[in-house]
């Protein structure tokens, strides 16, 4: 059973929040030591799990056939999103495209 994450701690109760869609493509340099890559990936997973449990990283989906993911973050500002992305161990090897999301009038709740 999937548990619901909490609300991202940087968003005070009753305050505004912003949803961002992030597409992250990973490019690890060819000559990077496999032990270093394994360590980076382990630390990346731990950080991703931490952010999901906090409620800041709302969705995480693998892009089939690529070393990439699409994610939804719920944070208080674009500056906070940048802090989160920069805290990822794989950040130096990520090509990230961010899109701010807005409510769609045809969405069924």
Image (cartoon, grey):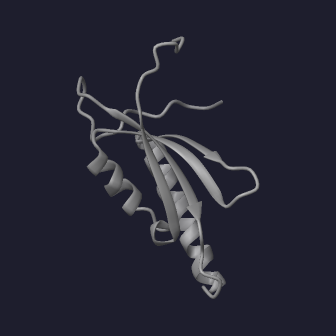
In the picture, residue 11 is in which quadrant? top left
In x, y percent, where is residue 88? Answer: 44, 62
In x, y percent, where is residue 82? Answer: 34, 55
Give the residue drawn at x 48%, y 53%. 97
Judged left or right of residue 65, residue 30 is left
- In this rendered view, identify the residue nearer to me: 19 or 53: 19
Judged left or right of residue 80, residue 5 is right
In x, y percent, where is residue 60? Answer: 57, 44
Q: Is residue 28 above or below residue 94?
A: below
Give the residue drawn at x 60%, y 80%. 29
Q: Is residue 93 above or below residue 48?
A: below
Report how many numbered discs are placed on residues in the image: 0
In x, y percent, where is residue 90? Answer: 50, 67
Q: Quadrant of the N terminus?
A: top right
Q: Residue furthest right?
A: 65
Q: Is residue 36 above or below residue 44?
A: below
Give the residue drawn at x 37%, y 54%. 84
């Amino acid at each position: 059973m999937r548990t619901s994450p909490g609300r991202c701690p940087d968003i005070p109760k009753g305050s505004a929040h912003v949803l961002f869609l992030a597409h992250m493509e990973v490019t690890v340099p060819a000559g990077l030591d496999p032990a270093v890559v394994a360590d980076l990936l382990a630390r990346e997973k731990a950080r991703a799990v931490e952010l999901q449990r906090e409620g800041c990283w709302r969705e995480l989906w693998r892009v089939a056939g690529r070393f990439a993911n699409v994610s939804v973050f719920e944070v208080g500002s674009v500056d906070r999103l940048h802090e989160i992305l920069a805290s990822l161990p794989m950040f130096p090897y990520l090509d990230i495209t961010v899109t701010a999301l807005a409510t769609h009038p045809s969405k069924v709740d």
